[in-house]
Each structure stands twice: as C-alpha cells, then as structure tokens.
C-alpha cells in the first residue's frame, strides 16, 4: 500500500519537493494545498486553500489522514501548524512552533548564536524608533537593518548612508511597511565576503548538510537593486572547498546541534543556514526553518536518494542511519519574474513556450495557476524556475539560459548573471 502525502504550500520550493516525492516508489498520492499549475501535474491540488490559515490546514489534515504532512513555507510553521497536526497523531516534517522562532524572530536567533559561540555579525536590538534613529551608523555604513519578524524574505535593508538609514527606520518602525515584523529591529555590522547557503536535514539524532548552494537575492544583474525572495541559484556553490566545509561543520553545524540539545529545541525538519564567507571564516547571517526558495530547486535536482525515506527518518529521529546520495552533476536555476517585482506587478499573463523546453530541463512553477483550455497563467512575482543540470557548472548554466529564452509571458524578466560569483558590496 503506497503512502499518501499532504504537502502544504504552493511555490517553487513546494513544486521541487512534490516533483522529488513523486519519484518515490513508496508514494501513492500527493495532496497539495494550495499548489499551483506545475504542482498539479504530480499532485491533487486543493483549490482555494490558504497555507497560512493554520486552522483550515489542520482540518484538512484531519480530513485527508495522510501518512505524512510536509510543511513548505515559514508562516504556517511559525504559527504552530506542526504542533496542531502532530496532536492528531499524524507525523509532520517541519519544526514545531518553539523551534520556528529561529526564523520568526531574528533577535531569538542572535541570542542563540551568541550564547552558543557560533560566528555571526556584531548586533544590537532596538524596539524604540527614536533610540534607533540616534544610533544610525552604529557599525558604520552600509548599515544593516533587519525587521525582527517574518517579512517574506524582504525585511532586510542595507542603508548606504545616513539619509537612507533614516528613511529605512521610518519605513520599518514609523510607517510599519513590514507590519508587526518591524516593531523590533536588529542592527548588524555589514559583513563582506561571498554569501552562501547550507541546507541541513535535522532531527534529534543528527544534523546532516545537503549539497551547498548560492542564491541571488537582488533583482538586477551585478547584485544591484532591492532584495527579492531570490532570482536564481546554483549548486554546488563555487566558493565551497574541503577546508571551508570542515570549518562550517566545526564552527557552525556542531555548535548549532549541541545548542539545540542544550536549549531543549526538538528540531525536526530542514535548517537553512545563510552564511557569509569572510576573511575570518564562515559567519551565520540567518537561520530559516525550511527549504530555501529557490535553493531547493537546484539542490533537489541533485538528490539521488528517496526523499520520502529521509522525511520519514527525520520524523522518527533516525536521520543518523540514513545514507544520502547526491549526483556529481552541477545544477543552475534561473527565476523568471513578473515585470515590477519585487514591487507591484500584474497577474494573469499567459505563459507560452513551456512545451518547447529541452528534455532533461525541469521548469518549477512558483507563481502560476491553470487557465481556460489548459493555458497556464502567471499568479505571482516569481513565476517559474528554469532548472538545468550538466557535467560542469558552465554547461548547466548554458542549458538553463538557452531554455529560459524559450519561455514567454508579457513582462517576463530574469537576471542574466545567475551562476557568476559576486562579492557582497562589489560594484
């Protein structure tokens, strides 16, 4: 008897998870809430579902009675959906509400990092706007300002000078452009180096890093313009060496896992570690409680093991027993976005060319919905992730871009330099 999986979410990350789970011979059915036009090719999507309505999601789990629930996005995790579903006796892949503070509160994470001696930027927490205004340039410029709570990947501002810092503070704590997330602001020193990401499977028995990846947050080529949820990614990161991997294991992963034990954090799911590779070694920029998006699209393209085996092992604290295998191939994912993103953008644009992509190219849907007569329409800021693999980094990159060119919709935009190593702050 095959297993039934309930997957919560509807973005590119969830499409990548659904795509990989669908390859498991153990999976009989995938139900996804809400899903998207791409996920609908491998799963039964629950139309009109709201992943952030945790009461509705808990009722859905009760009605479907899946063998496993996989929670993709950060908001339902932060709102305690894992706890609600586990109370029904259904296993969940995704950390509980207590552990989810590692993403839901940047100040919580800073305290954790400092308490356990994990390298990170100097920082100070502010809850008063006037006090923060008086401390502009605390660590020099650019001044890093982070809204404490969840802000859909957009709550970080790098203010180049005193005037930009003043505007950012007024936006966050005065106009509250990030809502409650900006009521507390973390100010950090600006680290310089190369940004990289490590995604780890975690349970009570082990912390196991996946293959490395590098993400591109800024909207324009050359790492310019405002931050987005991610305009592309590649794996493995070109900056990772055996020496760096050893440093990360010793200075970051080991102390993090020990810290979870000491603090009573029963973390079971994916820990995403955002790093800055500085002259002094790796330093932690942030923790997230789930698969990164779009890092997942390139990382899961290279996973050769059965993803369901890993998920089940994590829910049962058996991760240490798993032997996880990865392809030697390189992967590159180029995100196609709507015109105007990360600001305002229009939806409902017809997507063409998906039937023209080469064999072996996977196009993950991030913001799409089905239209009339089998059409696919845009339904978000980030629309598609064109993901290619190759024997070399350059080969994968060339394939991704050759196929990105084939896909059209009104206002389609994508960066042309995904896969090029950029140093933070470089011109």
Image (cartoon, rainbow, N blue to C red):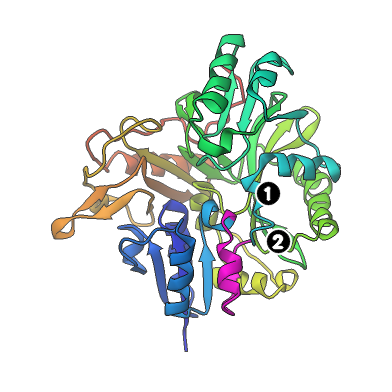
Counting from the top left corner in percent of width and height, residue 336 is at: 36, 40
**Secondary structure beneath disc 2?**
loop
Rendered location of residue 344, percent (x, y): 34, 32
Mark 2 Cα within 10 Å, few/some/many (few <14, many 20+)? Answer: many
List x then y, in percent, for residue 286: 67, 40
In depth, the one of 169 and 239 nearer the eye is: 169
Identify the residue at image location x=57%, y=69%.
84
| Chain part drawn in magenta | 78-95
The one of 196 and 4 positioned closer to us in this rendering: 4
Instruction: Residue at 64%, 54% (x, y): give it.
Output: 100
Residue 27 in picture, x, y percent from top left: 46, 78
Query: For mark 2, what is the residue?
Result: 267
Q: Taking 212 as reference, is 55 left or right? A: left
Asked if residue 274 shows in the view, the reply is: no
Q: Are marks 1 and 2 in contact (CB under 8 Å)?
A: yes
> Which quadrant would residue 343 be assigned to in this image?
top left
Q: Is residue 197 left or right of residue 252?
A: left
Label 1 element class: helix
As drawn, is 153 to the left or to the right of 320?
left
Q: CA distance from mark 1 to mark 2?
A: 10 Å
| Residue picked out by circle 1 | 102
Q: Is residue 316 visible?
A: yes
**Corner quadrant of residue 345:** top left
Residue shown at 65%/18% (left/top)? Answer: 130
Structural crowding at the residue carrying mark 1, measured as other residues with C-alpha within 10 Å and reported as few (<14), some (14–19) or many (≥20): many
């Amino acid at each position: 008897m095959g297993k039934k999986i309930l997957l919560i979410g509807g973005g590119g990350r969830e499409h990548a998870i659904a795509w990989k789970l669908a390859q498991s011979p153990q999976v009989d059915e995938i139900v996804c809430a809400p899903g998207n036009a791409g996920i609908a090719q491998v799963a039964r999507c629950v139309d009109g579902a709201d992943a952030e309505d945790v009461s509705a999601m808990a009722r859905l789990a009760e009605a479907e009675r899946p063998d496993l629930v996989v929670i993709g996005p950060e908001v339902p995790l932060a709102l305690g959906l894992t706890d609600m579903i586990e109370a029904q006796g259904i296993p969940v892949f995704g950390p509980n509400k207590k552990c989810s503070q590692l993403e839901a509160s940047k100040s919580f994470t800073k305290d954790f990092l400092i308490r356990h001696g994990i390298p990170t930027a100097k920082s100070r927490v502010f809850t008063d706007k006037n006090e923060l205004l008086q401390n502009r340039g605390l660590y020099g410029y650019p001044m890093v300002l982070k809204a404490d709570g969840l802000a859909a990947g957009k709550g970080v501002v790098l203010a180049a000078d005193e005037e930009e810092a003043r505007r950012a503070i007024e936006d966050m704590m005065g106009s509250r452009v990030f809502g409650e997330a900006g009521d507390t602001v973390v100010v950090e020193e600006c680290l310089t180096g190369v940004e990289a990401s490590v995604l780890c499977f975690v349970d009570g028995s082990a912390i196991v890093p996946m293959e490395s990846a590098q993400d591109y947050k800024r909207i324009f080529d050359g790492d310019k313009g405002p931050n987005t949820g991610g305009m592309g990614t590649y794996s493995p990161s070109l900056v990772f060496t055996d020496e760096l991997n050893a440093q990360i294991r010793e200075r970051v992963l080991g102390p993090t896992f020990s810290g979870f034990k000491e603090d009573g954090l029963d973390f079971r799911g994916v820990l995403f570690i955002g790093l800055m590779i500085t002259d002094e070694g790796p330093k932690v920029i942030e923790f997230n409680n789930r698969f990164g998006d779009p890092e997942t699209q390139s990382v899961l393209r290279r996973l050769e093991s059965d993803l369901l085996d890993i998920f089940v092992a994590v829910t049962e604290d058996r991760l240490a027993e798993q032997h996880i295998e990865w392809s030697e191939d390189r992967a590159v994912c180029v995100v196609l976005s709507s015109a105007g993103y990360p600001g305002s953008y229009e939806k409902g644009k017809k997507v063409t060319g998906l039937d023209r992509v080469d064999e072996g190219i996977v196009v993950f849907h991030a913001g799409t919905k089905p239209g009339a007569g089998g059409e696919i329409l845009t339904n978000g800021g980030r629309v598609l992730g064109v993901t290619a693999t190759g024997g070399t980094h350059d080969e994968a990159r060339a394939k991704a871009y050759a196929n990105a060119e084939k896909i059209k919709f009104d206002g389609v935009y994508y960066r042309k330099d995904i896969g090029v190593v950029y140093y933070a702050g470089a011109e």
